[in-house]
Image: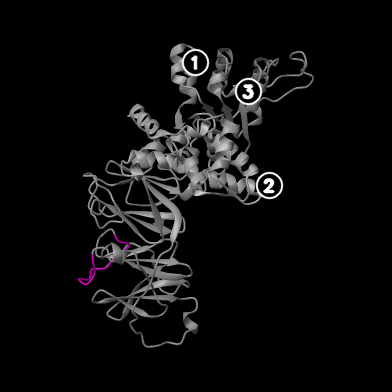
Amino acid sequence: MRNRSRARPMGAGMETLELYQRGEVVARYDLGGRAIEIGRALGCDIVVNDPGLAERHWLVMQKRGTVVVFDVSGGKRERSLEHHLPLNQLVPLGRHYALKRVNLAVQASVPKAEPRTESLSTLRLPLSRLVILQGRGSDARRISIGEGPIHVGRALDNEITVPDPAVSEHHLRLEPCEAGLVLRDLGSRNGSFVNGVRVHTAVVAEGALIRVGRTDLRILARGGEGHGPTMVAESSAMLQVLGDVQRAAGLPWPVLIVGESGTGKEGIALSLHTLGTRKSQSFVAVNAGGMPRELIESELFGHEKGAFTGASAAHKGVFEQAHKGTLFLDEIGELPLDLQARLLRVIETGEVRRVGAEAALRVDVRLLCATHRDLRAMVCEGAFRQDLYYRIARLVIEVPSLRKRPEDVRALAKHFLAQISVELGARELSSEAMSLLVAYAWPGNARELRNVLCAAAAAAGARIEISDVERALARVSGPGASRQMSDEALRRAVDEHRGNLTAAARSLGIPRSTLRDRLKSAA
């Protein structure tokens, strides 16, 4: 027998596992916040050389005020069940060993009894709020995480099967623990990597990137929970963005957030701040495209009293206001070239000089920038400085448009209706109204969706019908807006009706010829 877990001298007082060999206690192990693996394999926490045990036999862990056991030696069904480990009762382990769960702090007050073997009772598992995102982009899929172990590998009996020749048959296991999940490599051929580092055993929390072979697995919160401000996400594309946000949040580097207007770039920036190391400091946001040219310089860098007409008092610029915190420059592509040069100097030197000042001030900010423009094209055209671009784009996060992630429309619609229920009362969308929202192309993205729902909810009763949505779209987005269908929605409707264009067009409320022409143009 070889012990790799928390073995300690007998006699200390706390909840413990006692390991018996032929009726004698041979070791005790503290039950902490993570599972203990028992088996014959050298990688187990407790290695027991007993022919009656599998290479990897049991996982023992504390949960919901008790101790449970997962049998990881069998197939997928057996591994999905948890068994209660009774207190002060021997449970057989292989041919010559047994386990007993004891509380040494109270053991002295418990009358001694003849040990007896107790069978394990079975409990079913509830699901947690975490998901695993497997793969990238539109090919990615989400796997819910329960409270039991999850096996990953190429074999079909894994909870997550990875069809990758560089992945072992049984590559790794994810085990629930107090801090998130414990990743345990199961002796894989090519290793398991967490955030680029090869590990044998590691605690992985929300936001972690796991790589097995050539496949990525990301640990994310369902529905975008835990991302600071409310970030509603159900689509694989947006969950991948939120995974990027979680990994980038702890880094000090500048981030460029790219996306169409209304996609939630400021929410992404605020998430980077609230999940980062500067979350207790200021978050200062300024729109570089929303101010007159003569005020931008003063707003960015500040000014001294009397620096120009109307400067009746000294003013701190946003760099000074965000000192030790985060500065978010929205629509940085609108910044004039001469101010781009000044901004570059501040980034390079960490010093800012107010308008009219003789001396510079030291500033320490984490810089986040956003734009709806193609800055690389602007660099080629000479409209944006190349050196500034490479300074602010050390990390780039691209936020997809809503028409590229129609799965998020339903979640966003429910979220916005819940927000406005405070003023208008509860509102519910009919299935036809929701179908129209999902099919619409949303050129104004989530901001347009929110405005349409506000208009529809204000004019409707407790139930919002498709006619209410059509009228709201006409008011907010213009006549005929309701007929602007996204390519993704069209293809999905055709798939749902198994290629029947007539039925698909009827469900979308558009002529069959229109659907046919749109599909041709999108091909």
Q: Amino acid at mark 1?
A: Arg
Up-down: is 33 above or below 105?
Answer: above
Q: Could you say which disc has been placed on residue 348 in the image? A: none
| Residue at horizontal 44 percent and vertical 52 percent from the top | 130
Q: Residues within 10 Å of mark 1 (few under 14, many from 20)?
A: many
Q: Which residue matches tag 1?
A: 385
Asked if the magenta segment contains residue 50, the reply would be yes
User: 457 or 364, which is in the foreground?
Assistant: 457
Mark 2 or 3, which is nearer the eye? 2
- Mark sitting earlier along the chain (2/3): 3
Residue 2 pos. (x, y %): 28, 65
Q: Which residue matches tag 2?
A: 423
The secondary element bearing badge 3 is classed as: loop
Q: Quadrant of the C terminus?
A: top left
Residue 82 pos. (x, y %): 37, 68
Q: Which residues are magenta?
A: 44-54
Up-down: is 95 above or below 219?
Answer: below
- Mark sitting earlier along the chain (3/1): 3
Q: Which residue matches tag 3?
A: 290
